[in-house]
Image: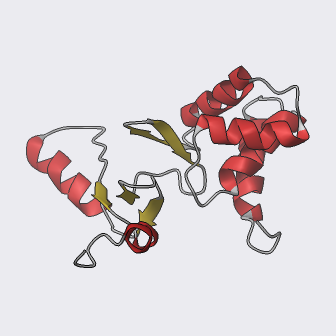
């Protein structure tokens, strides 16, 4: 990822929160944040771990899990529990809709406002702390092209 497209403001926001809430900002934790916030792919723990180990070979898998748990508790990462394990979104931690390729696992964010629906459901049914998760599944264009799915073959 080039420095021009890296979300520096988001990284600054999360690091400031970690500091003000008393969490140490170690080089490994910063590398995990960069891997998570810099990814457009909603990485898994293992993907983050492999990326961080390139620069910090002594980083443990437990460090990645602990950092993700810390970020989840602060509301700064969205965990997407999927069939093959969880994936994480550090760029946009509030609940939002996703489009997931069933062939390659690619995840795309969708700009669908779910806030109004969530509030309406909560109000109508008398619930509090209502959350939602909306996922669409299909086969992405790259996978269609690679396997000729939907091409009449």
> Can you say whether 81 is above or below 13 in the image?
above
Give the left or right position of residue 97, taking residue 21 as reference. Answer: left
Name the residue at 70% across, 21% down: 62
User: Is the N terminus in the top left, top right, bottom left or bottom right quadrant?
Assistant: bottom right
> Can you say whether 136 is above or below 32 in the image?
below
Name the residue at 55% across, 35% down: 72
Where does residue 142 sit, x and y in percent of width and height? 46, 71
The single residue placed furthest to the bottom in the displayed view is 151
Where does residue 24 sit, x and y in percent of width and height? 83, 29
Nearer the observer, 88 or 102: 102
Residue 136 sits in which quadrant?
A: bottom left
Where does residue 59 sit, x and y in percent of width and height? 82, 27
Give the left or right position of residue 49, taking residue 108 as reference. Answer: right
Residue 98 sits in which quadrant?
A: bottom left
Give the left or right position of residue 7, taking residue 46 as reference. Answer: right
Give the color scheme: rainbow, by chain, secondary structure or one colour: secondary structure
User: Is the C terminus in the top left, top right, bottom left or bottom right quadrant?
Assistant: bottom left
Nearer the observer, 14 or 151: 151
The answer to whether any part of residue 97 appears in the image is no
Nearer the observer, 37 or 55: 55
Nearer the observer, 60 or 18: 60
Where does residue 54 sit, x and y in percent of width and height? 85, 41
């Amino acid at each position: 990822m080039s420095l021009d497209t890296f979300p520096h403001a988001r990284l600054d926001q999360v690091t400031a929160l970690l500091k003000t809430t008393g969490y140490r900002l170690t080089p490994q934790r910063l590398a995990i944040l960069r891997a998570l916030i810099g990814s457009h792919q909603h990485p898994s723990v293992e993907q983050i771990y492999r990326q961080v180990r390139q620069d910090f070979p002594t980083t443990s898998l437990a460090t990645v899990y602990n950092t993700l748990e810390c970020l989840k508790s602060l509301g700064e990462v969205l965990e997407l529990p999927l069939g093959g394990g969880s994936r994480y979104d550090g760029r946009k931690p509030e609940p939002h809709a996703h489009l997931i390729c069933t062939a390659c696992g690619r995840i795309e964010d969708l700009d669908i406002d779910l806030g109004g629906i969530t509030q309406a459901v909560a109000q109508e049914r008398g619930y509090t702390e209502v959350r939602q998760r909306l996922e669409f599944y299909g086969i992405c264009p790259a996978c269609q092209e690679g396997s000729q799915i939907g091409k009449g073959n």
